């Protein structure tokens, strides 16, 4: 049994009370308790999902728990993204039954992109029959209706038979009375009017609404795809780092075909033209006459007008074509619950695909990629033990076992980018910070990228960065937007993994060993500077790759000291033990630079000559790869004083960059620290701890708005 009723995926803890505001996909059913969500029996680690009223009701009968949770409608993810991740997840019903190689064959992009950017058959039908709908709205059929009203005598046209009798009994309508007759001021008159609100016209008006709704969704979908394609073209043309370009082109080639940008643009223009024409019908006389409350059942009646009129007949056919692809399904509570669970798990599966692809791009993979994936996988590709774990709550962890470090990836299916007010945004950011502070390691939150236009850059930076810090405890965490409508999601996830793995390996400099250095003070003071005492004088630091002669000299020195101590008697036996312990670590010391000297890009082991010590007082260094001509190492921050890792690709910026997330779009997963340079400049880097830029001497320099 657990210590709480609910499981918080961000903090990784069981809780008994859920706050008033929380994120979709954040909380799950804890195992061990019979739980009902929205009156549907749930499984362990099922998500809290909203019903049709945008609420969740959670009942745990055995614990007398009955709680209702209200969602902020703004954070609901759009239907396009929900449908896309659900389609992707259909190939991943059971992750344990799928091999690593199978996952790599699944594209993280929305399926059937080439088909989606083309004009659909239904849209061709709309285009062919739209002229008939226009004709109906501008020249509708009407019914003549006769109405008797009291009007001024000058406007009366047809006088009914009962007008005289009515006039005799209504003296207020008399102008004056003479000896022979009555001169009327108002009389009854027959008014003949056109009746617009007939069944056939209701069909036409509601069809305008249905088609506009359909075209609006299609425009959003094609616009997303077109933006993805055109943005990719700009990003790849704006720099000269070919490794990133090749990866993106490979992904592009899996899902896209040549000339797709022109097709998407033509489709978008055609859809917008039809949408605008339908929008113009909202000003037509017929549309204004028929009230919004005049509904029509989806199954049409075959009236004489709909069957025989040349324009209404085409409108009727268009309605039936619309109904074929937009049948309204009224889901039961259980069906809606299942659909929502599938969508939330679908986004989790999508993030799993991103992680696997990113690891593969980093040349990390299991020993056998053709056997079913287990929950705990050992990854090969680095000179250290790395494990990938998939937890029961649908989160993922990467462990660096030898360094006792790990990082968590939590997928949250919430549209946090749509929080338009500062109060709402700040409140949800406090939720993030409060929960990540309780986690036992760095947490990366993945959420669906919605491409909301006009969002404030200062707000966008806080939900698109790997280098965030909580205000209270200064806990490190990251928030990354990912989407099946973006070619750069794999790059974003891959960079977070590289920042964790290669960042920790670089920060392991200088290698430290717990050895009583008071016993080898002579050897420490009489060497070429590759070994020194640590600050507490209770261990040693290897500040440079030891040469073969250095290791042999150390081995001889220790062996000599052991012989000297042994003849001193039993009183000095503890020194013999210390020296023997030291002697046993010499092989480890000789290999302690294997990780640091391995190029993080091409993974080739570099010779010791490629290593350069920079400043001994702060233990910084650089190392250059002779294969791919990149540099990596540790920089010292002039602001916070900490060292931070970097990878320098030795490339020059072709353009000034100010767009949020540009680092992932231009360099992708090949960087650790974020660069801060202008056009024509080489790479300079911001501190990963405090974001300080040494070039502009500020934590809020001109390039701050592009911080990722």
Image (cartoon, rainbow, N blue to C red):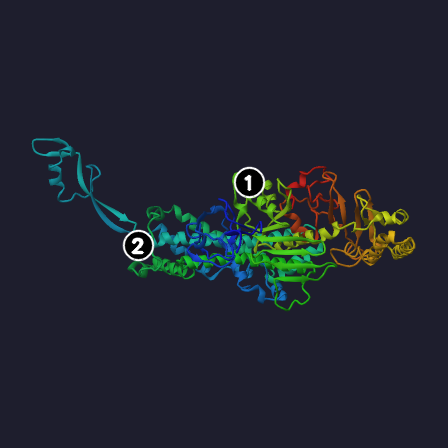
Please tell me which residue lies in front, 431 or 355.
431
Residue at 73%, 48% in the rendered image: 645
- Asked if the residues shown at circle 1 and circle 2 are in contact, with their CB atoms under 8 angstroms apart, the answer is no
State the residue lying farthest toward the left: 179
Q: In this view, does 166 lie to the left or right of 278?
A: left
Residue at 61%, 56% in the rendered image: 396
Q: Circle 1 is placed at which residue position? A: 426
Q: How crowded is mark 1: few (under 14 residues within 10 Å), some or many (20 or more)?
A: few
The alpha-carbon separation of the residues under discs 1 and 2 comes to: 51 Å
Q: Circle 2 is placed at which residue position? A: 199
- Determine if residue 560 is in view: yes
Instruction: Single out the mark in the foreground, 1 or 2.
Output: 1
Task: Report helix, strand or loop for mark 2.
Answer: helix
Residue 216 placed where, x, y %? 47, 52
Q: Is residue 523 left or right of residue 469?
A: right
Answer with mark 1 or mark 2, whichever residue precedes in sequence. 2
Residue at 21%, 47% in the rendered image: 146
Residue 13 placed where, x, y %? 56, 51
């Amino acid at each position: 049994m657990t210590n709480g009723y609910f499981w918080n995926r961000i903090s990784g803890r069981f809780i008994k009370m859920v706050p008033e505001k929380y994120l979709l996909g954040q909380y799950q059913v804890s195992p061990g308790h019979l739980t009902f969500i929205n009156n549907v029996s749930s499984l362990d680690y099922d998500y809290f999902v909203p019903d049709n009223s945008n609420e969740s009701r959670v009942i745990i009968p055995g614990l007398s728990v009955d709680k209702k949770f209200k969602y902020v409608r703004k954070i609901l993810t759009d239907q396009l993204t929900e449908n896309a991740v659900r389609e992707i997840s259909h190939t991943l019903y059971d992750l344990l039954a799928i091999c690593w190689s199978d996952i790599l064959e699944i594209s993280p992009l929305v399926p059937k992109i080439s088909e989606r950017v083309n004009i659909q058959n239904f849209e061709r039908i709309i285009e062919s029959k739209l002229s008939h709908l226009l004709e109906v709205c501008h020249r509708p059929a009407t019914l003549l209706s006769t109405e008797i009203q009291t009007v001024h005598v000058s406007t009366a046209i047809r006088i009914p038979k009962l007008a005289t009798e009515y006039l005799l009994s209504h003296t207020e309508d008399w102008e004056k009375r003479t000896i022979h007759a009555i001169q009327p001021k108002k009389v009854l008159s027959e008014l003949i009017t056109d009746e617009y609100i007939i069944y056939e016209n209701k069909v036409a008006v509601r069809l305008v609404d249905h088609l506009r709704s359909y075209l609006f969704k299609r425009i959003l979908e094609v616009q997303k795809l077109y933006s993805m394609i055109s943005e990719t073209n700009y990003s790849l043309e704006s720099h000269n780092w070919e490794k990133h370009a090749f990866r993106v082109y490979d992904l592009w080639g899996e899902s896209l075909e040549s000339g797709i940008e022109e097709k998407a643009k033509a489709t978008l223009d055609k859809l917008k033209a039809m949408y605008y024409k339908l929008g113009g019908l909202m000003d037509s006389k017929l549309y204004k006459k028929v009230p919004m409350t005049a509904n029509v059942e989806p199954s049409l009646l075959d009236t004489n007008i709909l069957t025989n009129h040349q324009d209404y007949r085409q409108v009727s056919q268009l309605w039936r074509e619309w109904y074929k692809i937009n049948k309204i399904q009224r889901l039961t509570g259980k069906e809606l619950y299942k659909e929502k669970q599938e969508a939330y798990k679908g986004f989790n599966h999508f993030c799993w695909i991103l992680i696997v692809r990113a690891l593969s791009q980093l040349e990390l993979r299991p020993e056998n990629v053709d056997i079913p994936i287990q929950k705990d996988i050992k990854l090969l590709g680095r000179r250290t033990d790395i494990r990938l774990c998939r937890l029961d709550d649908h989160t993922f962890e990467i462990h660096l076992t030898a360094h006792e470090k790990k990082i968590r990836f939590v997928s949250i299916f919430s549209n946090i980018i749509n929080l338009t007010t500062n109060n709402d945004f700040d409140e949800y950011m406090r939720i993030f910070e409060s929960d990540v502070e309780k986690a036992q390691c760095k947490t990366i939150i993945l959420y669906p990228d919605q491409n909301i236009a006009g969002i404030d850059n200062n707000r966008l930076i806080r939900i698109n960065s790997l280098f965030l810090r909580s205000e209270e405890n200064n806990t490190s965490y990251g928030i990354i937007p990912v989407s099946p409508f973006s070619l750069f999601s794999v790059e974003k996830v891959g960079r977070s993994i590289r920042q964790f793995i290669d960042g920790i390996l670089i920060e392991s400099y200088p290698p430290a060993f717990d050895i009583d250095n008071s016993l080898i003070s002579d050897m420490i003071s009489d060497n070429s500077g590759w070994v020194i005492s640590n600050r507490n004088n209770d261990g040693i630091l290897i500040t440079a790759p030891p040469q073969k002669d250095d290791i042999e000299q150390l081995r001889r020195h220790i062996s000599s000291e052991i012989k000297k101590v042994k003849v001193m008697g039993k009183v000095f036996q503890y020194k013999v033990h210390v020296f023997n312990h030291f002697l046993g670590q010499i092989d480890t010391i000789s290999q302690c630079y294997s990780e640091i000297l391995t190029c993080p890009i091409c993974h080739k082991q570099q010779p010791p000559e490629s290593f350069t010590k920079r400043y001994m007082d702060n233990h910084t260094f650089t190392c250059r790869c002779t294969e791919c001509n990149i540099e990596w190492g540790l920089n010292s921050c002039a602001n916070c004083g900490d060292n931070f890792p970097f990878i320098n690709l030795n490339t020059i910026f072709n353009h000034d960059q100010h767009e949020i997330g540009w680092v992932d779009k231009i360099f992708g997963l090949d960087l650790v620290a974020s660069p801060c340079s202008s056009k024509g400049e080489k790479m300079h880097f911001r501190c990963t701890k405090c974001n300080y830029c040494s070039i502009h001497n500020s934590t809020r320099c001109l390039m701050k708005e592009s911080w990722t």
